[in-house]
Amino acid sequence: DLCPVAFVDDDITKHKMHLYDLPVTGSSKDIPDLVKSLEIEHIIIAIPSLTNGALTEVVSICNSTQARVQMVPKIEDIVSGKVSVNTLRNVDVEDVLGRQPVELDINSITEYVTNRTVMVTGAGGSIGSEICRQLMRFTPRRIVLVGHGEFSIYSIDMELRQKYGQTEIEIIPIIADVQDRKRIFSIVNEFNPEIIYHAAAHKHVPLMEYNPHEAVKNNIIGTKNVAEAADAFGIHTFVLVSTDKAVNPTNVMGATKRVAEMVVQDLATRSQTKFVAVRFGNVLGSRGSVIPLFKKQIEQGGPVTVTHPDMTRYFMTIPEASRLVIQAGTLAQGGEIFVLDMGEPVKIVDLAKNLIKLSGYSEDEIPIEFSGIRPGEKMYEELLGENEVHPEAVYEKIYVGKTVEVNKDSLLVLLESFNRFSKEGLKEQLMDIVYEENKLELVKG
């Protein structure tokens, strides 16, 4: 059982007060001294609405002690009834990203989603499933969950039915491969969604270096199939989930996602459908990302493997990424690439150190080893190409880029003949297409 001994608060007017017969003994900067003098073993951060930047500072102070650090749940989880206020949880890496989450324009999304049919491809994946969860808050008339993996679609279907089964929202689970053009056209024709969120993709960088043909089939041809179905049946809006790896790509995954962007941007020039792409950095906790890997390595006693001490990445949480995708759909005019201001890039080694500390260990107990850069990896990522950050955001922390021209002939050659290329030849062809295109040109939203 916990035995409270003192409070701290940065509001100096509360100092020397007593709450429940316990003293307010100082501010957050006093925590290390208080831990020693009062022999404190457990610190609870009880400020659920604290902003990420301020929370990072408080957690850093607490982590400088030997005490265990936990938090009360986030305010949105308390309000939504997910947890009670007295449910303690460990501090997560997501809590200390140091960036305020982007707030949604609730009214525009309500008008855009409520009582409408929406379709999500890759609905069983990390991003796709969270898009589905976020969309359900806005009560669509029906939601079509499209995915290739039987178990992942079963899982999100069951989760949504358990939470929203008493509502009138129709939940439709569909097993389908985006590479199957006839099947995709049939689904879009049957359900006629007003909005399609296309999250289905192969995203693992080293794996796609070894399997470039599969990357082309899923990321480019799959996107082309769903996008052309949207065009053929007059779907109102198509939103492509993209990646910062599509900027000046050095790997197959990034190049195929850039070509996928080019496919939808080309369609945007001649379709009634509004085609847009949403580009963001690494997603914390998504399947295949570093956080689950680091957690597993820590559970196994280490070491935690980092590719290079200077490698950096942009990070955002799964809910934040999904909110951006939904918000982008409301901002779409057609042909844009939306980009989130993700703050400063994070050193992967610092992320590993934080996770080790937050898991209750020291670097002596769980060492970090450097394994070397993997095939196709970059030392750092970019969200837009050089000199392309427009000073005016089209929405809070959201910027927009636009490709001026797409070489349709090169795209056609790739799509018709990619199976005839060797692995290395296909990589070269992808890079040729990506780097011959015109530079991104930022436009005002």
Image (cartoon, helix red, strand yellow):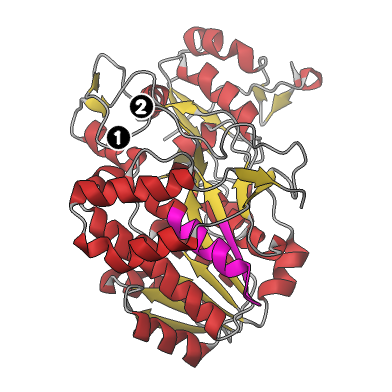
Residue drawn at x 68%, y 77% is: 114
> Is there a contact, CB below 8 Å, between mark 1 and mark 2?
yes
Depth check, front residue: 288 or 183 = 183
User: Vertically, is 401 above or below 334?
Assistant: above
Residue 13's x, y, as percent?
Answer: 81, 20
Q: Secondary structure at mark 2?
A: helix
Q: Amino acid at mark 1?
A: Phe
Q: Nearer the viewer, residue 271 or 148?
A: 271
Please give the name of the residue rendered at 52% of the width and 68% of the height, measured from the top-left corner.
197
For residue 352, the mark is 2
In the image as oriented, which residue stretches furthest toward the right? 13
Circle number at residue 294: 1
Image side of residue 282 versus residue 429, left or right: right
Q: Quadrant of residue 33?
A: top right
| Place of residue 11 in the rendered image (x, y in percent of width and height, measured from the top left) | 76, 22
- What is the CA distance from the residue labelled 1 to the residue labelled 2? 7 Å
- Mark 1, Cα crowd under 10 Å, few <14 / some 14-19 / many 20+, is many
